[in-house]
Image (spheres, grey):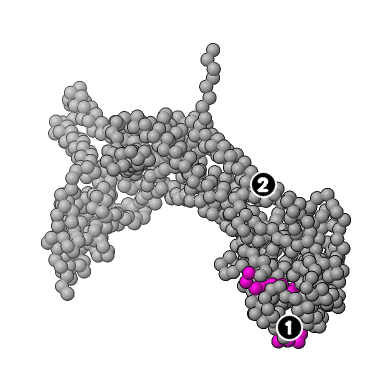
Amino acid sequence: MAAPSFSLSRTQLRWLEWLTLSALLLGLVAWASLREQPRVINTFVQDITGWLSAPVPRDDIVIVAIDDASLQSVGRWPWRRSVHAQLIDRIAAQHPKALGVDVLFSEPDLQHPEDDVQLAQAIAQAGHVVLPVDWRMANVDIGAELPLARLREAARQLGHVNVTVDDDGVIRRYSGAQGEDTGPWPHFSIAMLCASGQSHALCQGTRPPEPGEQWVQRSPEIFNFARGDRPYTMYSAEDVLTGRIPADSFRGKYVLLGATASGLGDYFASPARPASRHIAGVELIAHALDSQLSNQHVHAVSLQSNMAVNLAAIVLALLAIALLGPMAGLLAQMTVAAGLLALCLALRSWAGLQLAPGAALVGLLVIYPIWSWRRLSAAARFLQQEMHNLRAALDTTSAPQRNGLLMDDFLERRIKAVETATDTLRQMHGFVRDTLRQIPSPTFVVDPLGMVSLHNAAAVRYLQNLGVPSQGLIAIQSALQGMRTKDSGQVLSFASAEQLRALPPECEVLDREDHPWLLLAEAFRAPAPAGWLLMLVDLTELHKAQQQRDQALRFISHDFRSPQSSIITLLEMYKEFPGQMSEAELHRKINRLAHQSLEMAESFVQLASAQSQAMQPQLLNLDVLLQEAVDDCWAKASEKKIQARYLPGALEAAETDIVCVGDRSLLQRCFVNLLGNAIKYSPSGTVVEASIADDGEYWQVEVRDQGFGMTQEQLDKLFQPFQRFHQNSQPQISGIGLGLSFVQTVVLRHQGFVSVTSGVNEGSCFSLHIPKAPATYPGVQQPQS
């Protein structure tokens, strides 16, 4: 049996690549963080944050410098120890809190042994003196190089002046205690605190420790360099010896005495002055003393905590590129990097903690390019596959022309292929969109979730008529809410895909206003995504036409056949009973019935012609046309002893041209039908009047009679075909109810409208509103200015 095959989707492959990249990158960042790598980036960021967060220097730290001027005045180095004693006496005379002498006196002065005694006396009299401890190396052993026993006994404290030099030769750290594990010496700055009377756990005094088993460095600290190039007050030793300093320069202050002359003292490169000068050892002590006094210590965070911060930054960046788009992902990378740097500055400024973010910064730098490369490669593969599928689906073998300069550019070829396919799809989309737009019926494209993804202008009008918003996301459930089948009255539901799938291909439905519609539902077929095309076809006019057809069939089957049947009956009766009816009477009755049939047929022909025949517009004088219609009806009116007349109005008196643009034959027949209808439904001895009035943009043609009138119910059905209202009360009046339908049809085709006022036994007034001829129409007389 064959082994089952497994394939990953594009999304699964993307997440697998992301997880692989994440695991690899997190592992490298963790390894680099535990080894404080890369040191160059770490030290650069730490130096910058140290410079930005540098504290304000204290004003109670003073440096007495053995500088070049002092050497020129006193003499070359080394000075006699009596000079140092004199210098200590002058400083002690102002009662400083503590005096630190950063000069090592580890061997006796054999030429002037009395100077050692004088120096010891000066140190003892000062009372708060700190002397340095240095280190000597013999082969691989390290030992403390202490001051002379006489001087050590006279001093208050001893402190080491050793510093740690980093790989780049810059001084950034020192140990709070260093020496034998039985009692390491405190740093010189801490010894100054001890000498001033402050208690500290590392205070050692001047007694050497017992020999230990190993050399230790404890309480590591980072220099927190104060702000400024020369932050502390500095006096030359020459000025102190000659008394050229203010009287209270050292009172209540911490005084440090040390060498700053060129080639004399120890000079170190420090991040506090990267571009100006090196810093002397006595100044390093001053910066350390400032941190001790202000309790502004700076310590490196633990390796584990530093690793956690770096990993957190990488995790945020990885999530950003996985969840956000390209531009947002890039901005997120930059934001995370800026946030990490801001965190370094905040921790250094407010918590005295120093991070090593180099590993995270390098990781942030490489995440985006690596991920972009992988996504670009995946996109290229996807485009190639999709182009192949698209060409197969479109049944085309055309390929983009290669550019000679870029023929080997793989991505450029894919872009050209996408351009070609996009252009084809754009044309197809435009064709579909334009086709959908031209469909006169409301049409909806529905996705599998029941949401309208596309609809045409007719659908917008339909939704607006129902008060449903046509903008934004539309659910077909709300768009077709209240739809019910005409036969069963069951309300249709479109809430789920199953309900949409259950719709028949076509069914007649009623909307919330009981308008009839034909609902057509067509499901999309593969390979397109699942969805439906719903179309509503308005059946109102169709139902109206069917109703008129049924009325016409009923009329033809009854009324139109009636005179023909009567003629046949008369002929059969005359044949069977020749003596009961004279030939003249037979001819008279047949003539009447034949004319009645002819009138019915002519009415049909007139109405059909008015509805369908092409109009022949020309410039017409309505007053002349109406007068001719009155003349044509004179004979019929005289037969019923009715007076039909045309009433010239103020328009003719003012010699106004009563002109319109219309079809002469249709309008003349319209006026004749309207006058004939008024004569037909008026009793003998009455008057039928025709007139024309000015009604703004229309000519108002009025025909007023003194006939039987109509009720409001009859007025509502007045212009419907085959409506006869007086066949019961006035059976002698013949007709089939098409005359007024013809009138309304003609007026509507001339872009006008008809209005009627009537009352029972009060007569009726028909008003035909016909548009005036445009002023620009040829032959229309322009008004005089």
Q: Which residue is mark 2?
A: 34
Residue 780 drawn in magenta: no
Q: Is residue 348 left or right of residue 721?
A: right
Q: Which residue is mark 1?
A: 241
Dot 1 or dot 2, earlier in sequence: 2
Mark 2 residue element: helix
Q: Position of residue 703 (x, y in %)?
A: 25, 57
Mark 2 Cα-neighbour bin, 10 Å: few <14, some 14–19, many ≥20: some
| Magenta segment | 243-263
Q: Position of residue 344 (x, y in %)?
A: 64, 58
- Is residue 164 depicted above or below 735 in this figure? below
Q: Is residue 154 left or right of residue 463?
A: right
Q: Residue at x 34, y 56 (%)?
A: 757
On the rendered image, what quadrant is the C terminus found in?
bottom left
Q: Position of residue 246 (x, y in %)?
A: 73, 86
Q: Position of residue 290 (x, y in %)?
A: 73, 70
Residue flagged by tag 2: what amino acid is it? Leu
Callout 1–callout 2 Cβ contact below 8 Å: no
Residue flagged by tag 1: what amino acid is it? Leu
